[in-house]
Amino acid sequence: AYEFVPFNLPLVRVGAVLGFVAESWVSIQPFSNGVVWSLCVEFWYYMLFAAWVFAPPGRTRRVAVSVAVLFAGHKALLLLPIWLMGVALQRAQTLRRLPPKGNVALWAGGILAVGLVLATHAYSPITAAMAYFVGPWIFTQLAQARVFWFDWVFGLAVAAHLLGARTVMTRLPLERLAPPIRWCAGVSFAAYLFHMPLLHMWAAFLRADQGWLAIALTLAVIALLGPPVERSKRWWRRVLDTVAGALPISGPTKP
């Protein structure tokens, strides 16, 4: 189960993750929790956003944005358009004025597009094609952004679905399902953090034909760890608010 999990240089791996630089210019896998690469990428998107919005215009802003770009690295920048799709969904008022039929079409079309990509395993031949055309060295350096242009297409499908869902969901009695939806949302970060190490651990003890049991045990542990992880966010918020309150920042500036 741990055949392809790197265990060398433990301090470097832990430090890279804690500093959110595990995917900057080189890829440093954090032991068996390979999925944390996306957290190290997303962190710098928020730093870029903060540098652009909160830093004073002029030299200070340019330096802040440049530092964030430097730490983000080429892979994060190649995947940045996908994050910006979410910003556009949240901020663009014109996107929210589509007619109901248009929203339904986006909602259903997004589901169909994502389902088609998953059902046909479209990423496999595209990844193989990229490896052939760019060569092994560039392909390795791209790491998680190795097929960034197809990730943009996939991101557009997800964004279209979410945009249409804003209207479609208003016609469903979601208030009846609100408690379980909120609970699942509350443990989603714990699921992100813990699912891969847990699956590796169960795979080391269970037979190959007991994958269903590994998934069930993983979900059970996440259900136990999720609520305390969610509650710990309050403590982190208080600490970060204290730190932010001590910084010489007068408030957000206009981009």
Image (cartoon, rainbow, N blue to C red):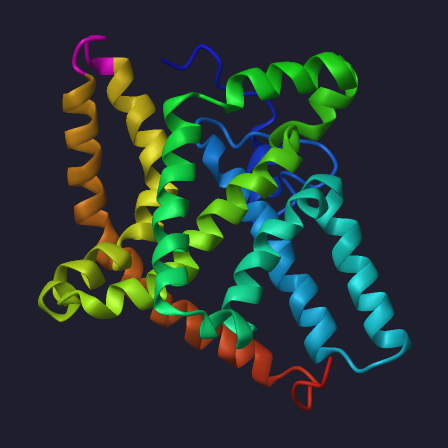
Q: Residue at x 35, y 67 (%)?
A: 100
**As drawn, 94 above or below 103:** below
As drawn, is 64 to the left or to the right of 120? right
In magenta, the rendered stretch is: 205-210
**Number of disc labels:** 0
Q: Is residue 124 above or below residue 82?
A: above
- Where is residue 186? Give x, y as percent: 27, 59
* Residue 91 rendering spot, x and y as whole percentages: 55, 73
Q: For this rendering, which residue is in front, 56 or 21?
A: 56
Query: Residue placed at 44% from the left, 10% from the top?
Result: 3
- Looking at this view, name the residue that lies furthest to the left: 176
Q: Is residue 132 left or right of residue 204?
A: right
Q: Nearer the viewer, residue 204 or 158?
A: 158
- Residue 19 in view (yes/no): no
Residue 60 makes an appearance in the image: yes
Q: Quadrant of residue 13?
A: top right
- Quadrant including the N terminus: top left
Compared with residue 6, is residue 182 higher up or lower down, i.e. above or below? below
Magenta stretch prevailing secondary structure: loop
Between 213 and 117, the residue placed more toward the observer is 117
Residue located 41% across and 21% down the image: 120
Name the side, left or right, on which 88 lies relative to 183. Answer: right
Q: Quadrant of residue 204?
A: top left
Q: Which residue is located at x 58 percent, y 38 percent? A: 151
**Which quarter of the rendered picture does the C terminus lie within?**
bottom right
Check if residue 10 falls in the magenta segment: no
Closer to the camera, 7 or 25?
25
Could you tell me residue 228's position as x and y percent?
A: 24, 58
